[in-house]
Image (spheres, rainbow, N blue to C red):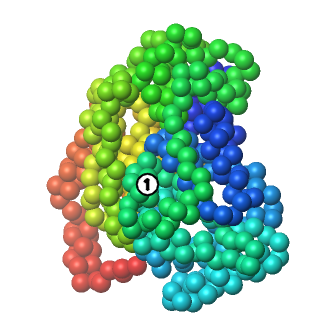
Amino acid sequence: MYLDLFQLKELPFRLSPDPQFLYLSKAHARAKAYMESTIWFTDGFVIITGEIGSGKTTLIETFLRELERDVVVAQINQTQTSVIEFLQTLLSQFGFSPFRMKKAELLATLNQFLIEQYSAGRKVLLIVDEAQNLSLRVLEEIRLLSGVETTKEKVLRIILCGQPEMNEKLDSPELVQLTQRVRLRFHLSALDLEDMKGYITHRLEVAGSEGRQIFAPETYDVIYRYTGGVPRLVNTLCDTAMLAAFTDEMAQVTLKHVQDAIRELRWVEFALRPRLPHAAHAAGEGHAHAEILPQSAQTPAGPVHAKLVLSAGGKFIREVQLAVGRFLIGRTSANDLQIDSRFVSRHHCQIVTSQKSCVLEDLNSTNGVVIRGTRVRHHNLNDGDVISLGEHELLYVDQRPHSREARELADTGRHRNAGAPDSPEKTGERAGNQHQPSNVN
């Protein structure tokens, strides 16, 4: 990658949430203060909303890292669940094994646990990320949980974080009682131009820039025009622009490199972007499936160098094509390839494609990336590699001319061998083996 060229210690624009890279704009600082207030006040929910990529998850991770030891935390990210599954997940976060309990037993166990923690002087905090996916029934159950109290105060602190459509749910007539218990409600907006400049500089400093001006001053206006100050989009564009500079062997990102990156990503100006529809999911775990949302993933810019064939349980799901640039794979709709599975992290891995190669990188995923039975973090993909992500598999097919020629040569050799007459010994051996049963493992 480009670390040596830019004299950096680590990649500055990774998409995985890393608290050390958090840049506290005024809006992010305020949202963090609201989260912190839940530790001292127990009289209602705190609701944090923000667009996809606005930094909600990084904010949560930073907040959790700074909590005192007397705070017991349950963090729930998988929100497409039924009421029973939600309660089971909550109790499992507290160290129980509740998967055979019925609802009455789940609630009794949870109530007893909350009272015990209060008596021991510990605070209990529930944080739900991606809360916009919670069903109305689960949200109502959370409201009822918030009612567990002693004679003096509530014993469960609750923070719900989600995308803007969560506000529509909260304003629905069915959730009037829950909305009345909301103490603080804050929307995390995108960065303005000056904050975006500070954000880029901060991430480069954390990565080891030591004050060097890696992005030319004239690049910032263009970056802002195409990202709207949304942190995740800023990360994507800046990382791709640094790859463009790396290809040119230049240690500073110029306006040309940013423009090259925009062309590779096939982006339009942020103000002209259509709002991406959010995938609708029924309550409950359902079947794992994959969905591709961003336009860049469906119609890659430039020549196609490789493709991925996605399958699960031996069943074909779909193909996606890889052109020069970065291709993100994960559980949420913000990825180029969305795989909706509890075994796949929000941003699980990425594939960086250049003219000569495709490199797979694990983005600190929980369950990892496995190739040929080995967990890998950085891997130069070869034609025919099978990438395992939990229950899903991605077959990598290199479509560059040299790789295609090698495949054709190998196929020709196989056909030639298949057509050659067998020796009498081979023929007899094969005939004898036709009646032998095969072992199926």
Q: Is residue 154 left or right of residue 14?
A: right
Q: Is residue 336 left or right of residue 368?
A: left
Q: Residue at x 31, y 27 (%)?
A: 272
Does dot 1 land on a helix, a strand or a loop?
helix
Q: Give neighbour class at mark 1: few <14, some 14-19, many 20+ (Cα, 10 Å).
A: many
Q: Is residue 217 left or right of residue 419?
A: right
Q: Nearer the viewer, residue 363 or 88?
A: 88
Q: Nearer the viewer, residue 223 or 412?
A: 223
In the rendered image, residue 305, in percent from the top left (x then y), is placed at: 33, 33
Q: Residue at x 71, y 53 (%)?
A: 37
| Residue 262 position by quadrant | top left
Residue behind mark 1? 166
Q: Residue at x 24, y 47 (%)?
A: 411
Q: Residue at x 66, y 52 (%)?
A: 35
In the rendered image, residue 281, in percent from the top left (x then y), is placed at: 34, 62
Above or below residue 228? Residue 17 is below
Asked if residue 157 shows in the view, the reply is yes
- Type of the residue with mark 1: Met
Report the label total: 1
Say which quadrant the C terminus sits in.
Answer: bottom left
Q: Nearer the viewer, residue 184 or 351?
A: 184
